[in-house]
Image: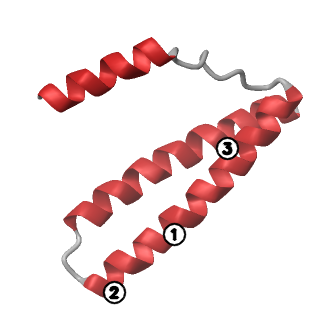
C-alpha cells in the first residue's frame, strides 16, 4: 500500500477516534475517567495534527481554502445573533 493511502487512512481513523472520545467525555461523570479520556484525546489531536502536516507537506492532503475575512465576520455575526 502506498504511503499516501496509509497516511490518509490513519488521519481518517484518528478523526473518528477523536469524535468518539468527545462523546465519552461529555457523558462521563467520573472526574478521573473524564480527565484520562481528555488526555488521550489531547494526545490524539497532537498526533493527528502531526500527520496532517506530513500529509500536507508531501501533497497527500490539500486542505480547503482559507476563509476570507468577510466570511469569518459573517459567521461571527451569525453566531452572536443566535
What is the spatial separation of the Cα atoms under label 1 and label 2, in whole angstroms?
Answer: 12 Å
In the rendering, at what x and y percent does residue 32 appear? 33, 86
* Whether label 2 touches label 3, CB < 8 Å: no
Residue at image point 88% right, 30% down:
58
Does 79 sit left or right of 7 as displayed?
left
Q: In which quarter of the image is the N terminus?
A: top right
Q: Disc 2 designates what residue?
A: 32
Count neighbours of disc 1 (C-alpha within 10 A) and say few if under 14, some if 14 to 19, many if 20 or more: few
Q: What element carries label 3?
A: helix
Q: Disc 3 designates what residue?
A: 10
Q: What element carries label 2?
A: helix
- Identify the mark nearer the N-term, 2 or 3: 3
Q: Residue furthest bottom?
A: 32
Q: Nearer the viewer, residue 33 or 68?
A: 68
Q: Disc 1 designates what residue?
A: 40
Count neighbours of disc 3 (C-alpha within 10 A) and say few if under 14, some if 14 to 19, many if 20 or more: some
Does 19 sit left or right of 48 as displayed?
left
The answer to which quarter of the image holds residue 73 is top left
Specify whether residue 72 is in view. yes
In the rendering, at what x and y percent does residue 4 appear? 82, 30
In the rendering, at what x and y percent does residue 60 appear? 79, 26
- Identify the mark nearer the N-term, 1 or 2: 2
What is the spatial separation of the Cα atoms under label 3 and label 1, in whole angstroms?
Answer: 16 Å
Q: In this view, does 33 lie above or below 7?
A: below
Q: In this view, does 35 lie above or below 40?
A: below
Q: In which quarter of the image is the C terminus?
A: top left
- Identify the mark nearer the N-term, 3 or 1: 3
* Whether label 1 touches label 2, CB < 8 Å: no
Amino acid at each position: 500500500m502506498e504511503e499516501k493511502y496509509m497516511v490518509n487512512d490513519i488521519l481518517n481513523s484518528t478523526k473518528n477516534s477523536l469524535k468518539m472520545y468527545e462523546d465519552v467525555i461529555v457523558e462521563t461523570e467520573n472526574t478521573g475517567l473524564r480527565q484520562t479520556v481528555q488526555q488521550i484525546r489531547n494526545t490524539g489531536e497532537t498526533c493527528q495534527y502531526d500527520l496532517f502536516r506530513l500529509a500536507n507537506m508531501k501533497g497527500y492532503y490539500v486542505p480547503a481554502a482559507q476563509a476570507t475575512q468577510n466570511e469569518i465576520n459573517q459567521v461571527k455575526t451569525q453566531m452572536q445573533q443566535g
